[in-house]
Structure formats: structure tokens, C-alpha cells
Amino acid sequence: MKMNRFKYNLKRYVFSGRYFVRNALFVMILATIVSIGVVGYSLISSGSEENKEAKKVETETVSRLSVAEPSMIVDVDVDKLDQLITDEQKVEVTAKQETVLTNTRYDMTGKFLCTIDTVNIRSIASEQGEVVGCLYRGATGKVTEAGKTWTKIESGDVTGYVATELILTDAEATEKAEEYKGYIATTLESQVCVRKDADPEAEILYLADQGETLIACEDSTDNGWFNVRLADGTYGYISADLVSVEEDYINAISIEKIHAAQAVMKQITDRAEEEARKAEEAKEEEDRRKAVEEREKELEKAQAELKAAEEEAKKAEAAEEAKKAEEESKKETEKAADKQTAQTTTQESPIDADASDLYLLAAITYCEAGAEPYEGQLAVANVVLNRLRNGGYGKTLADVIYAPYQFTGCKMSTFPNALKTGGSASCLKAAQAALNGENNIGGCKYFRPYKNLNLEKIGNYTIIGTHAFY
């Protein structure tokens, strides 16, 4: 009953000729709403400009047909109209859904989206253009000038041109926007280390200042570490405790920031290489030191063994050597006794000398032969005077005595006191006798302990006390 009444009212008030104008306007409005719904549905389904135009033409055609042939309105079937109303409601729902989508954060109308790992931004629309920045995967920004080959963009603090084929724009970008959303990691402290691996002992790649932003590759951690991307494109890891991570689209990186990051990384690399070099040198030095110590220990051991063997050999030869030494000493003593009995005393020209010269001669005699008998002291004094008479050792007594590398007695600690006292009474007497011309060694100018000399090679010599004069 209700359905019959509904149909009756439609025929009387809607499809009646009396309400033709009103009904025509109603149908036109309804057709317009349907057209809008169809266009919106087409845009969401196809996502292309060509389909947009096709749907627009189709919709306009439907609108013109609805207005151009109003007679069709009168003959329309009520059941079909009921179906039309249902389709209209569906189109309106679809249109509302499209409106909600384009108003979300993923709406890329007038924007671009980079879906490639790295894209260069150039100063001019040419491959020869200078690189002014870089786009990484997920970077977005504003399209300021669209072109078939090159597109001018603005992103962050970078403005330039990118190859059109390398980015998505408008509807295509909107479709992929959620898939390529990014994450920004902001450092919470200064000098935050970005390391090569997710390990606190891993190599340091970069040091980030407090508040510096880095590209996070995901919003979850890998055992307490975030995988991040530096300005120059290098990947690294940063402790999750030292950064905060938020979802956001990333901007382009300027070439200045890239160069700055590379400079910091180079400093870190150079410092690490220098430390590694020093550590290697220290290790080599330590190895050399240990090797030297080992060699020294081995040498000491070998020397100890050799010394023990030598001592054993010496013990076997000690008696024989002592016996030979005793025999040689006896022979030398006999020879010395023979020479001493052969001494002769001659008279030379006296030397004009004052008291200081006397004490100087007595002092050197004391230091060189203080323990010798008087004849040995006289002989030493005459060696000094023979050199003075020769003239080749000095022009004065002091010149002869202080001549370099000649008389070691003048370097002895007892020499200064002997200058004051003459050393001893016998030395003063021997010095005075020698100055007066008394000579018991002839022209000899040298003397040494005869035990230190090969007397056979000397030939002409005189032994007095322990000295041989020649």
C-alpha cells in the first residue's frame, strides 16, 4: 500500500506536466551531482590526466543530454529513478572519500617526491649545471616550474633543477607518499658519535652537535641503535638514547652541508689514522724492545756459560802462568841488577834556575818517582833537563813539564802540595843535583816501568829502580 502511494505521488507531483520547469531544474541539479561523483571516482581509479579529461567530457555529455531532451524525463520509469538515487548516494560517498584523501598529510599536489636513493640538484636545467644539493630517498619539496625534461624545485634551503624522470609529482607522488614517508633523528647532546656499526666500540664516522638533525632509515631501533644517513649519503649508527626520532618528510641537503660533513668526517678519519699509526709505531717499538731484551738475556746466558768455561780453563793454567811470571820477574830483576851496577855518573853544564824552578823540578820528580831510590829520582830529574837542553820540548822548565801528554805527575792531586814543599828532602836534593849538572842516565829523554816494555827492542837503556831510562 505504501509503495503504491509513493508511486502515485511521484506521477502526480514529480512527472506531471504542471511541474515541468521545477522538475527539469531538479533533474539538472541531480545530473550535475552525478557528474561530479563520476569525475571524482574516475580520478581516484585512474590517477591520470587523460582519464580526468575523458571523464569530464563524458560527464558534460550526460549533462547536455539531460538538459537537451527533457521529454525523456516524463517517460522515465519510477523503478529506474529509484535506482538512480541509490547510485547518486554512492558517488557522493566516493567524492567525500577523495576529498578526505587530498586533505591529508600525504597530499602532494604541487609537490614532488624522490623515490630514488640519490638525485643531484643542479644550478641550471642541464647535466653541465653545477651540483647545488642532493635529494635522498623520501625527500620532498615544492615544484616551482614543471617541465618534460627538467623540473625546478625548492626543498629546505636548496633551489635548483632535477631530471623530471627521477621524481614523482602531484597525483603520482600522492599515491606513493605514505610508502616513502621519512623519519628525522634529532641529537639530544653535543658531540654525539655516529659509528660504522651498531657497537659502542665501532669506528667513529661523524660527530654531531646538539640539536643536529639526521635522516633516520626507520623509526625502530636495532638493539638500541638507529640506522641513520649523513649529509654526504654515508650510512651509520647512533645510540637510541642520544636522539629523538619523529616521522616527517626530509628536505634536500645543500652542497655546503655535504662538504661540511665530509670535512668533519675527514678530520675524524685523519685523527684515527694518526692514532693508529702512533699505536702501530708504539707496538713496533715495544716489540723491538722485547726482542732486544730477549737477545740480551740470551747473550748474558751465553756469556755466563763462556765465562764459566774460561774460569775452568784459567784454573788449569793459573799455576803454569804464575810459575812463568815468577821466572820472568826473576830474569828481569837479574837484568836490572846488572844494569844498575853498570851506571856511570857524568857532569853536565849546570842549569840556571831560581827557587820556583827548583821546587817545580822537585815536585814533578816526587810525583813521578817519589817511591824510587835517590838514584831513580836523580834520573827522572835529568830526563826533564835533557828535554830542556834538547829544545824540542819547550824553552823553559815549565814548558817541558806542562807539555801535553808528557808527564802525568803534574795532573796528580799531590802535585800542588809538592810545589810548595818540594815533595820530599830526597827529591829536593835530586833536583838540585841535576840542576848543578850531575847526570846518571846520559842523554835519555824517556822512562817507563821496565815491566811494561820490551827491552830487547829498545836496545840501549838503563834500569834504575823500577824504571827503564832510554
Image (cartoon, rainbow, N blue to C red):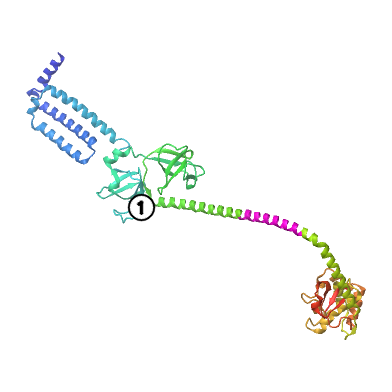
Question: At numbered mark 1, what does the secondary structure look like: helix, strand or loop?
Answer: strand
In the picture, the quarter occupied by the C terminus is: bottom right
Q: Residue at x 71, y 58 (%)?
A: 303
Q: In this view, does 110 lie to the left or right of 284?
A: left
**Picture quadrant of residue 439:** bottom right
- Is residue 110 visible from the viewing direction of this image? no
In the picture, the quarter occupied by the N terminus is: top left
Q: What stretch is highlighted in magenta?
A: 288-310
Q: Residue at x 86, y 72 (%)?
A: 331
Query: How many numbered badges does the structure rendering display?
Result: 1
**Picture quadrant of residue 59:** top left
Furthest toward the top, the residue is: 1
Q: Where is residue 235 in the image (x, y as percent from the top left)?
A: 42, 45
Question: Mark 1 is on which residue type?
Answer: Val
State the residue position of label 1: 132
Label 1: few (<14), some or many (≥20) within 10 Å? Answer: many
Q: In this view, does 107 lie to the left or right of 220?
A: left
Q: In this view, does 233 lie to the left or right of 453?
A: left
Please tell me whether residue 6 is drawn above or below residue 296 in the rendered image: above
Please tell me whether residue 143 is drawn above or below residue 340 in the rendered image: above
Q: Where is residue 388 in the image (x, y as percent from the top left)?
A: 82, 82
**Foreground: 365 or 20?**
365
- Is residue 427 visible from the viewing direction of this image? yes
Please tell me whether residue 16 is drawn above or below residue 122 in the rendered image: above
